[in-house]
Image (cartoon, rainbow, N blue to C red):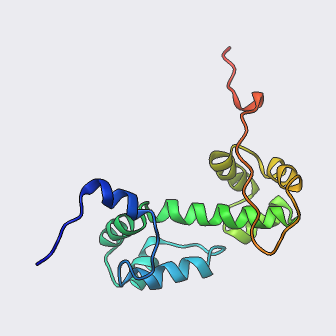
Amino acid sequence: MSTTVAPSRTRATATIVDDHAHPRLGAALTYIHHHLGDPLPLPLLADLAQLSVGRFVTVFRQTVGMTPHRYICLKRIRHAQWLLRHGHSPALTAHECGFYDQSHLTRCLKSVCGMTPRQFQTASALLPADTGRSPPLPRAQVVDGNRRSIG
């Protein structure tokens, strides 16, 4: 006898990543976490999970709550935030995190946090000293420069 979970509850629990949520995703998730600075093509990740590319994307989205591309991008941004917070240059950070170049890092960071790498570093410098764990992330701020002018 199997029980089904209501669709509304499935969505809420899908955002919690558990390596054991789907037996085949563990290898792909581990590979992603250890190779953020490298290219991570879907065929490679699907092969690690022993699934076809299409099935891998579907299972990943159902298990993790987002597409593999979005998950990788957010993991890279988190790693970039940590490096920037600890004084690394934006160019080195972009290279270490697997972004194409510093401009790519800037676009991604700005879309997630609402700030450029330098703005992020400045905001992070105002936080209390590192106490052994990651300090809270600065909240995105609306700046006049983010608004588009008409005309």
User: Does 100 appear above or below 133?
Assistant: above
Looking at the rendered structure, the number of numbered marks drawn on it comes to 0
Q: Is residue 17 left or right of residue 62?
A: right
Q: Is residue 50 left or right of residue 148?
A: left
Q: Is residue 1 left or right of residue 54?
A: left
Image x and y of residue 57, in percent: 36, 67
The residue depicted at 40 percent of the width and 82 percent of the height is: 20
Name the image quarter holding the C terminus: top right
User: Does 77 appear above or below 119?
Assistant: below
Closer to us: 97 or 4: 4
* Image quadrant where residue 22 sits: bottom left
Q: Is residue 72 left or right of residue 147?
A: left
Closer to us: 119 or 149: 119
Is any atom of residue 99 visible in this view?
A: no
Name the image quarter holding the N terminus: bottom left
Image x and y of residue 86, in percent: 85, 67
The residue depicted at 54 percent of the width and 73 percent of the height is: 40
Image x and y of residue 50, in percent: 34, 85
Image x and y of residue 99, in percent: 67, 63
Is any atom of residue 24 visible in this view?
A: yes
Q: Residue furthest left?
A: 1
Closer to us: 67 or 133: 133
